[in-house]
Amino acid sequence: MTSFDALEQSVESSAPIELYTISIGSTTYKYTSGSVAVTIGVDTWEPEPLMRSSIKKSRERNEIVKVTFPHSNTFASGFLGIAPGQRAYISILRLQRDSSPVSTILIYKGQVSSAKYVKDGDQIELQTRSVEAATGRAIPRFTFMGMCNHILFDNGCKQTSVGFTYTGAVATVVDNVYTVTGADGQVDGFWTGGWCSPVGANDYRLVLAHTGTDLTLLLPFASDITGQDLEVYAGCDHGITACGTKFDNVLNFGGFPFVPNKNPFATGL
C-alpha cells in the first residue's frame, strides 16, 4: 500500500491525474486529464485532452485559472455565442494513479467568467475565478432606497410562485421575441421583469417585455425551442404599488417607499 502523500513526495513514483467536475444547474460533467476513465465509487471521469494554467495561491484570493478544452467539448462550446443563463463551477481534484487506498485532494474550485476560441478555433479557453474571489466582495444586504431590496419569491419576500407562473408552448421564435401560447392570459406587462425557462432545461432568460402572447427576452436561447413548453415567472418592478396590487405582499415590502425625493446634502434644508 502506497499512500497519496508518499507518492506526492516521490520523484520517480509520482503519477498525478487531475479530475475535473463541472456543474451547471443540475447538470454535471466529469472529465479526467488522464488517458483512461477513472472510477471512484459511483462516479466516473471520462478522458478529455484538457489543459490549465498554473494555480497560484495569494493573500488577495483573486486566483484566475484558464482551462482549455477541445472545440468539440459539449460543456465548453455552450459558452460561445449565447452563454448559459446559469453559473458554472469547476472543481479540480488531484489523484495519484497508484495510491492505495484511493484518495483525492481538492486543489481548485472556481466559477466560469468568460470564454474564447484559441489555437485558430481548435480549442476553447474558459477563464475561471476562484470561489473566494467570486464571492469575497463585501456587498450591503440592504440599501436605503424606495425600491424593495428583496428578490421576488426569496425568503425575504416570502411570496410563493403559486399563481404567478404559467407554462405554455412556444409557437414561434423571431430573434429574441418568443410567442408563447396562452401568455396573454395575463395583462400586458405581467411577465415583464420575470424570467422563463424551457421545461426540463437548466437554462433561463430574463423577460424584458410582455405584450399579448409575445415575450421579449434579454437573449434568445442557444437552441431552437419552438414547440417546446416554456415556464414563465411573473416579474416585479420592486415598487410598493406593484407589491400591493399585483402580489398583495406589502407586509413584506423590503424598501423604504417614503424616502424624501429632496436630498438636503445637495440642495440644503
Image (spheres, rainbow, N blue to C red):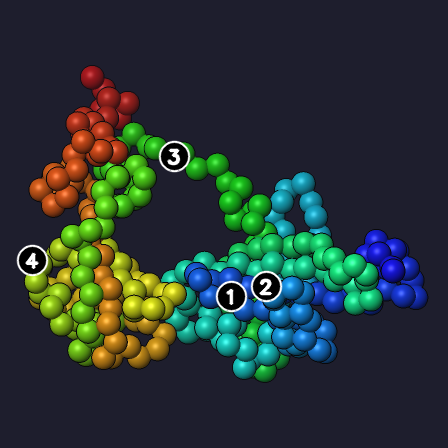
Tell me the residue at 28%/77% (across/down).
225
Is residue 12 shown left or right of residue 239?
Answer: right
* Residue at numbered disc 1: 28
Circles 2 and 1: CB atoms closer than 8 Å: yes
Tell me the residue at 9%/42% (across/down).
245
Q: Which mark is residue 141?
A: 3
Secondary element at image label 4 = loop
Residue 78: x %, y % from top left: 46, 73
Which mark is nearer the camera, 4 or 1? 1
Amino acid at pointer 1:
Thr
Amino acid at pointer 4:
Val
* Residue at numbered disc 4: 187
- Density class for disc 2 (Cα within 10 Å; few <14, some 14-19, many ≥20) is some
Tell me the residue at 50%/40% (across/down).
137
Is residue 182 shown left or right of residue 219?
Answer: left
Mark before the other along the chain sequence, 4 or 1: 1
Amino acid at pointer 2:
Thr
Mark pair 2, 1: CA separation: 7 Å
Mark before the other along the chain sequence, 3 or 2: 2
Mark pair 4, 1: CA separation: 39 Å
Residue 151 figure quarter: top left
